[in-house]
Amino acid sequence: MITNLKLAVHDGEYTVHRFAPESTIPDDALMGNFISITRTDDELSIVCDADISLNSEKNEAGWSCIKVLGPLDFSLTGILAQIATVLADDEISIFAISTYDTDYILVKKNTLSAAKKALSAAGYIFEN
């Protein structure tokens, strides 16, 4: 198990949007400090600041974002799985996003305190 990884909580609140797969990415989605856009054959998903209003088919607001401070080497294994397990053991659901450099774990805003407590107890270090 990889321990002593440093984490940080992003300021703000985020919304996860779902669009039809053929949808055009709205220009407003590109505003803000944290954006994740994923297109598959089944959907277009956009995560962005909650104060950005997008006309999506479905959306879920009220997410907080925990960043694994990186960059992380590609040879490291199980980082996201270990964090997900710690949170699952405390019945905290996640929405995970991985980038080239690191991982981001979104938890519902009302579970952020419990998530931080569980991760800290498991040996993760929060920087703010």
Image: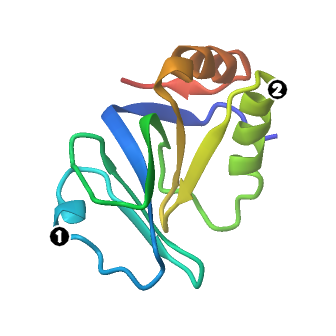
Quadrant location of the N terminus in the rendered image: top right
Q: Is residue 11 above or below residue 112?
A: below
Cβ atoms under marks 2 and 1 closer than 8 Å: no
Asked whether, in this view, residue 27 is left or right of residue 94, the answer is left
Q: Nearer the viewer, residue 49 or 99?
A: 49
Q: Quadrant of residue 74?
A: bottom right
Quadrant location of the C terminus in the rendered image: top left
Image coords of residue 90 (percent x, y) = 76, 21
Q: Could you tell me if residue 2 is visible in this image?
A: no
- Name the residue located 42 percent from the left edge and 25 percent from the top edge: 127
**Mark with earlier residue (2, 1):** 1
Q: In this view, which residue lies farthest toward the front?
A: 57
Q: Quadrant of residue 17?
A: bottom left
Q: Nearer the viewer, residue 2 or 65?
A: 65
Disc on res. 89: 2
Look at the numbered disc 2 and give the secondary structure of its residue: helix
Q: Nearer the viewer, residue 75 or 112?
A: 112
Q: Could you tell me if residue 74 is visible in this image?
A: yes
Q: Nearer the viewer, residue 51 or 105?
A: 51
Asked whether, in this view, residue 47 is left or right of residue 2, the answer is left
Disc on res. 27: 1
Which amino acid type corresponds to the residue marked 2 in the rendered image?
Asp
Separation of disc 2 and disc 1 at Cα? 39 Å
Label 2 crowd (10 A; few <14 / some 14-19 / many >=20): few
Image coords of residue 42 (percent x, y) = 59, 78
- Name the residue located 17 percent from the left edge and 58 percent from the top edge: 31
- Name the residue located 61 percent from the left edge and 15 percent from the top edge: 114
- Name the residue located 76 percent from the left edge and 58 percent from the top edge: 77
Look at the numbered disc 1 and give the secondary structure of its residue: helix
Label 1 crowd (10 A; few <14 / some 14-19 / many >=20): few
Image coords of residue 51 (percent x, y) = 21, 40
